[in-house]
């Protein structure tokens, strides 16, 4: 049995993109489950490892993928993971000890840092409805009862109507239900490069407008949309035209 048997590493895969040699080393210290979406029979994932649970599902959409995993495997604490994440075993063991303590203290979810220079890297803090907007999906652990009760919004995420923001909405919804979340200054995972939430184009601008409408709503959400996009124009050199795109999407989102 893995050393940290109360935790399940939930890996999302598409057309057998998850690699058995990478997964195998996780099984000695974590339970591992893979949800593999496929477009045809060739894309099914077959692993010769009885210690890894695999679910093949003919569908698309990252949020749908993760919701399938939550529905099946949420009897344990769930660590959200992509199939291109590197994990430092020693650091991860320390992180899980800290997460276990925080769950015992009543926190419903815990986020942590990315070891890559692309970040995010924050000090310890208690989450607010604003801080959860900075957290990528591969830096999240959900307490078992929270994993059972909440789901990703399937309108958001890769191959959905909006290509990002699903993890931020999930954490926001959990916080708004009255459950606390914490961030720890430990970096057990490494994801190289920027996520889809940082590649500025029309689709991302629309996703941000819809995200802020879905979460904050009213004039507050519109104000945040304008401030956020103006910041990206000046700091990330996003086109000023994307500000108008985000506002229009915010105004029309239902």
Image (tube, rainbow, N blue to C red):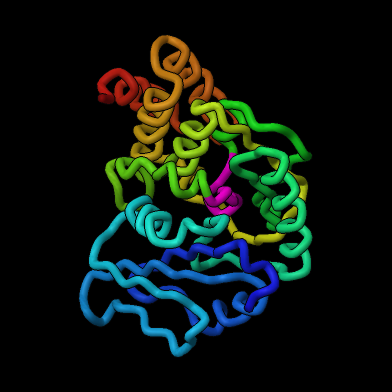
Residue depicted at x 34% and y 26%: 245
Seen as rendered, the residue at the extreme bottom is: 48
Give whichever of 78, 47 is nearer the camera: 78
**Exactly how many numbered labels are in the figure?**
0
Image coordinates for residue 111, horizontal then vertical, percent: 64, 46
Residue depicted at x 65% and y 75%: 2
Residue depicted at x 48% and y 43%: 167
Asked whether 33 falls inside the magenta stretch, the response is no
Is 163 on the left or on the right of 235, as rendered?
left
Is 34 on the left or on the right of 9, as rendered?
left
Seen as rendered, the residue at the extreme left is: 40
Residue depicted at x 37% and y 53%: 67
Image coordinates for residue 168, horizontal then vertical, percent: 49, 38
Q: Which residues are magenta?
A: 135-144
Asked whether 138 falls inside the magenta stretch, the response is yes
Image coordinates for residue 221, horizontal then vertical, percent: 44, 17
**The image quarter in which residue 175 lies:** top right
Give whichever of 118, 140 is nearer the camera: 140
Quarter of the image for the N terminus: give it.
bottom right
Quarter of the image for the C terminus: give it.
top left
Give whichever of 53, 40 is nearer the camera: 53
């Amino acid at each position: 049995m893995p050393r940290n048997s109360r935790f399940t590493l939930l890996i999302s895969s598409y057309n057998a993109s998850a690699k058995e040699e990478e997964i195998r080393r996780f099984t000695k210290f974590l339970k591992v489950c893979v949800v593999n979406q496929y477009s045809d029979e060739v894309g099914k994932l077959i692993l010769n490892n009885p210690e890894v649970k695999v679910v093949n599902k003919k569908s698309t959409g990252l949020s749908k993928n993760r919701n399938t995993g939550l529905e099946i495997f949420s009897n344990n604490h769930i660590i959200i993971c992509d199939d291109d994440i590197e994990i430092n075993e020693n650091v991860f063991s320390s992180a899980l000890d800290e997460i276990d303590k925080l769950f015992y203290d009543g926190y419903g979810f815990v986020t942590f840092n990315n070891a890559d220079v692309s970040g995010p890297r924050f000090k310890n803090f208690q989450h607010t409805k604003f801080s959860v907007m900075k957290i990528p999906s591969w830096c999240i652990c959900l307490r078992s009862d929270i994993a059972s009760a909440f789901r990703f919004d399937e309108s958001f995420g890769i191959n959905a109507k909006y290509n990002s923001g699903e993890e931020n909405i999930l954490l926001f919804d959990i916080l708004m239900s009255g459950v606390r979340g914490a961030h720890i200054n430990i970096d057990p995972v490494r994801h190289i490069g920027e996520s889809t939430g940082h590649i500025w184009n029309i689709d991302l601008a629309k996703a941000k407008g819809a995200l802020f409408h879905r979460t904050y709503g009213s004039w507050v959400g519109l104000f945040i949309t304008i401030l956020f996009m103006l910041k990206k124009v000046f700091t990330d050199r996003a086109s000023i035209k994307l500000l108008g795109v985000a506002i229009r999407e915010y105004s029309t989102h239902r």
